[in-house]
Amino acid sequence: MRRVALRGLLARKTRLALTALAVALGVMLIAGTYVFTDTINSSFDRIFSVSLQKIDVVITPDTDLSGDDGTTVPLDASLLRKARAVDGVRTAEGSVSDQNGTVLGKDGKPVSQQGAPMIIASLNGPAFESLNVADGRFPKTADEVALDKGTADKEGFKLGARISVQGVAPRKRYRLVGLTTIGGVPSLGGAAFATLTLAEAQRMTGKQGRFDAIDIDGDPGVDPRQLTARVRQISGRGTVVRTGRQEAQSQSDDIRSNLSFLSTALLAFGGISLFVGAFIIFNTFSITVAQRAREFALLRTLGASRRQVLRSVLLEGLAIGVLGAAAGLGLGIAVASGLRALFKSFGIDLPSSGTVILTRTITVSLIVGILVTLIACVVPALRATRVPPVAALREGVALPETRHSRLAFPLALVLTAIGVALLVLGLFVASGATSALSLTGAGAAVTFLGVALLSPRLVPPIASLVGAPLQRLFGLTGRLARENSVRQPGRTATTAAALMVGVALVCFAAIFAAGANKTIADAVDSGLRGQVILQNQAGFGAFTPAAGAAVKQIPGVEVVSPVRGATTRVQGISGKEALAGIDPAGFQRVYRLTVVKPRTPGRNAIRDLPDNGLLVETGYADDHKLKLGDPVALKTPRNGLLRVKVSGIFKDKGQLVGSLVVSNRVLQQQFGVDRDQLTFIGLTGGRENPAVKRAIDARLARDFPQVEARTAAQFTQDQRDQINQLLGLIYALLALTVIVALFGIVNTLVLSITERTRELGMLRAVGTSRRQVKAMIRLEAVITAMIGGVLGIVLGVGLSLLVTRAIDDFSIAFPVGTLVVVLIASGVAGVLAAILPARRAARLDVLEALAYE
Amino acid sequence: MIVTATDIKRRYGAGEAAVEALRGVSVAFPKGEFTAIMGPSGSGKSTLMHILAGLDRPTEGSVLVDGTEIVGLDDNALTQLRRDKLGFIFQSFNLLPVLTAEENILLPLSIAGRDPDREWIRRLIETVGLGDRLTHRPAELSGGQQQRVAVARALASRPSVVFADEPTGNLDTKTSADILTLLRRSVDEFGQTIVMVTHDPESASVADRLLVLRDGLLAEDSAGVAAPVVAPAGQA
């Protein structure tokens, strides 16, 4: 029996390959993701352990409330003196390492435009320095810099070159005196790494008299763990003391958790692709089981039990699963670097040193691939067991109609309903991002399944819809194609459903992105009163307040009002919350916040925001039952509590300031935040003024290349570009799903042609030309693909309507053009899928086809 | 008696549209006898064979195969019955295209998980005359050769009875004669019991006994109407 199953597979190699590929592509993405992220993690692990290997104990600021860009409140220099006095400390040194620097390339633009950080670091003493100089030497004066070799090579900097660096202090030109490597690697994960003397690094980063870390070397024979405990006693609140090894581990863990979002997202796409692959496998097996009914009947008359038939079909599934999963694993390892290139092309550069393949990668890939295949072929295998033995003696056997197919329609309705219910539950009821996300995902999957089961009923009407114009265009050929596509609605439906999933997700992403774009445009329109916005050229991250101050001096600039940001925890409410800071006095001249409460005439809740006052956004206030005058305690980075009262409740149509607002003065004093996040600028007369804008640009380019000035339109466009970039990435990943679905169409067509060999021979015998046969197959593929397209678009629209409804203040927009393109593209995809099957059908020898048995 | 059928009735459908395929047939087949069943289309001959082989269930009546009542058996028991006691030969050969001739012959044994009796298989292959063709796939064999493989396959497990459904229906006269001779020899030399459905009088003439069905009833039995007879009744 085993031999029958395996020989049968080998005899149909094309089908075997196509079916295995349906699993392989999904597994490929899963394996690729693991290899990709494991490789990144291990490169970082190595970098961190090298950079901390000389250090016994390290004191750092607590990172619990660090900003989005990782900024923390630096340590005070007095701590260094205290640390040196601790018993068992041989040497201790303070150091600076700031991710908010900017290094300019030869073209005068920052060397990293997106993503990868540019770090300004202080040179440590020989006891602690982990960098090596590959060429030249370390900086000795305040005018010298060492740059990582990776960046220097990329930019073509040679020793002696003039290099501009900007931090909190304005741009300064340094002489390049050294090229550094770390642990033998020329680059720290794609980041630019500028090393200055300690004093210069402190000046440049605005951390005079302060440190980002204090490194400690213990006396010989002192256990670092004991030393850690002793240092902890003097380090005070808001600091963390760890051994060098623990610190390396902690930094690795940070990277890991930052990357985990990425890997989860990629794995989700792999899962979607496997989900679609399961449709293909199910369909292929259903068709082959039907075609081989006689074979199963024969085996049954020869004494095979139902269980043996079941096992033989499942064995085929197992073989395909093993083959597909193994191929996927191999491909995944191969594409891991491709994945890195993909991310790089979308502006996310991640480090890699040597491919890492963990056992987990192999086991998970194989198990998932095999399991999905087996699950998908269980139903066809069960169907094979229902072939009665007597079928071996009859010509033209059809599989018996089972009670399952009679139940299919109600089951489909129930499944769809459950899916939608799960979606609603996930979107509107569930609290907590994880459960909401998994409920929504499960809901979408179940809905897809439900609609797929429902679609046999939808196939005939949709086929008539998309087939009617084809029939008009192609006459009898078109008509036959349409008739053929509805001959076995279940088969067409499953094939189309595979494509439907991909199309639905593409449409969903497109509609969602269009909505997000519109939301941002609306927000900027309705919120922004100023004419110019200053932001970090990277698109996010804080920048020096000196930029705003410099711009203020330009004639024609009337108001400069910075918004700053910190992270806090609100006592009594779980989770972290962003806290924005504003300059109350001028803020309303550049940005519109609608004060809902209090509506006291004469007093203005924003302008008159007191130091002990807190402004709360209406949605947040409703969610957490905060009323005017309620006391609120905010946790500060130094483990203190800031006690404030709700002094106003506002509505923010622009969604640029977040839920909680205090004054910048409070933010600076309590949270140590002294850099701007966004700075709004109001020009004289309240109108855009190109001349003034040019003056601002020039001023920034001279001293603050890190900062860029954007008009409202440019600002909107920037956001739009970011969204579209993300959309591009999503499209690229969904393409995989669509490709799997296309294989499904190819597979179904090839199988149908085998089934209709005799009929095709007859058509050829009565005078149908090869071209007409090809056209007929092609049109059938187009109809199938368009059914998937139509269903997908409808589902995608429904899904996005549901999801966008769950988001507050989200404007919905329909990218009609994109949707039309998607529909046309599915038709074109059908043509592509038909190339091989059509050629096969046309090649059939008329006589042989008629004699075919 | 290897197979005894008593008062078999088979009705398809219900009410007005009901078709009575068999209307009360009683017949018994002794061991080592070659029986041919003939009759015009729709006479019920195929239905009778299906019921005797446990492939179809009678509406009424009883079928004993080698002492076991098979009417009402569940699927597992019927599977076991097919494994141990029944062999089949089909009109369209029904070989698995992916297996070699030898593998096809041994298929019933490997399905049952039984070790083949090498000596018996060797003798079988010699008898059907396929010695040099064993490693060929069905597609590389002529129709006659394919049917020889099928005959060998049916005999491989030494079943109590072999059912043959128009075994020469797809073959030319010369090859048909070869296959019939082969069946005859298996009865004479190995004591095999064979029940063969055919519409071809030439084919039927090699059998020991001829049953003719007409309109769902046994119209003729060369061994005496509905009377089970042990002795071979010569050639009808």
Image: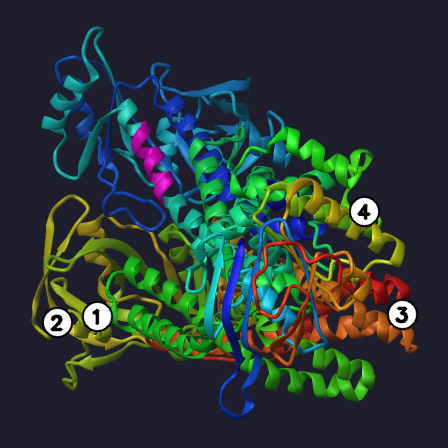
Tell if the residue under mark 1 belongs to the same chain as the one under mark 3: yes
* Residue B125 versus residue A520 in the image, above or below: above
Segment tinted magenta in the rendering: A248-257
Whether labels 1 and 2 belong to a single chain: the reply is yes
- Horizontal and vertical percent position of residue A263: 44, 47
Q: Is residue A675 above or below residue B217?
A: above
Which mark identifies residue B145? 4
Chain where mark 3 sits: A
Q: Chain of mark 2?
A: A
Q: Amino acid at mark 2?
A: Leu
Q: Are marks 1 and 2 in contact (CB under 8 Å)?
A: yes
Q: Is residue A508 left or right of residue B163?
A: left
Q: Quadrant of the C terminus of chain B?
A: bottom right
Q: Which mark is residue A620?
A: 1
Q: Which residue is mark 3?
A: A770
Residue plotted at (43% across, 29% down) = A196
Q: Nearer the viewer, mark 2 or mark 4?
A: 4
Q: Secondary structure at mark 2?
A: loop
Mark sitting on residue B192: none
Label 1 environment density (alpha carbons within 10 Å; few <14, some 14–19, many ≥20): some
Q: CA distance from mark 2 to mark 4?
A: 91 Å
The residue indicated by pointer 2 is A626
Q: Position of A282 compared to B121: left or right?
A: left
Which of labels 1 and 4 is toward the front? 4
Rendered position, A508 above or below A221: below
Q: Earlier in the sequence, mark 1 or mark 2?
A: 1
Residue B152: say if magenta: no
